[in-house]
Amino acid sequence: MALRNIRKEGDPILNKKCKEVTEMTARNRELIEDMIDTMYEANGVGLAAPQVGVLKRIVVIDVSEEGDSPIVLINPVITEADGEQTGPEGCLSVPGKSGVVTRANHVKVKALDIDMQPFELEGTELLARAVQHELDHLEGVLYTSKVEGDLMSAEENADEGE
Ligand code: ZN
């Protein structure tokens, strides 16, 4: 298991647009494994590659109770988004804070898996929120730019960082 350093808000890499992944190399595979380890170690429900300093379109998400079902999305694109949910959100790159963000309540995404095979993912509620939050990271966007009202201190939501 290899943990990577999570970049924090203020690090310019978090505001850059990520590049598409064109092939699955040993280096990319190791990056993905490290991202999953790093997400679990930080008790997060999602992590995007720029959060560990790599400008590639890769995210990992796990919203399961057990934390044993990581989803890997490579070059993800949202193909459908509808409904609306408004609720607290946090980010591993903005530790100790949370803020209220309105997102679509249902999304469909197309992406490549770790073997570069295309698949579709559909999710609602927390999964839909995590997908939209992580995909924003690939565009260099932090949730703090979408918060309604003030950023709050986040003890209660400490386990929902993305
Ligand atoms: Zn985040």
Image (cartoon, helix red, strand yellow):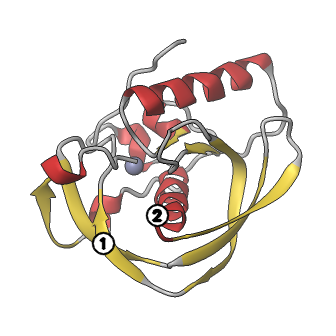
Is 76 situated left or right of 10 in this image? right
Q: Residue at x 52, y 48 (%)?
A: 64
Is 156 situated left or right of 87 in this image? left
Instruction: Give the mark nearer the N terminus: 2 vs 1.
Output: 1
Q: What amino acid is labelled 1 in the image?
A: Gly
Is the C-beta of the residue carrying label 2 under 8 Å from the nearest atom of ligand 1? no
Image spot of residue 79 (x, y percent) = 72, 74
Is there any visible trace of residue 41 in the rendered image? yes
- Asked if marks 2 and 1 touch (Cβ < 8 Å), the reply is no
110, 65: nearer the viewer:
65
The Cα atoms of the two marked residues, 2 and 1, are separated by 10 Å
Image spot of residue 17 (x, y percent) = 54, 50
Helix or strand or loop: what does disc 2 sit on? helix
Question: Which residue is farthest front?
Answer: 66
- In the figure, 144 relative to 40: above or below? below
- In the figure, 156 relative to 86: above or below? above
Q: Quadrant of the N terminus?
A: top right
- In the figure, 1 relative to 145: above or below? above
Q: Residue at x 50, y 79 (%)?
A: 104
Question: Which residue is farthest bottom?
Answer: 83
- In the figure, 156 relative to 96: above or below? below
Q: Residue at x 48, y 58 (%)?
A: 130
Image spot of residue 60 (x, y percent) = 58, 42
Is there any visible trace of residue 154 in the rendered image? no
Residue indicated by mark 1? 87
Residue 13's quadrant in the figure?
A: top left
88, 15: nearer the viewer:
88
- Give me the disc on residue 121: none
Q: What amino acid is labelled 2 in the image?
A: Leu
Residue indicated by mark 2? 126
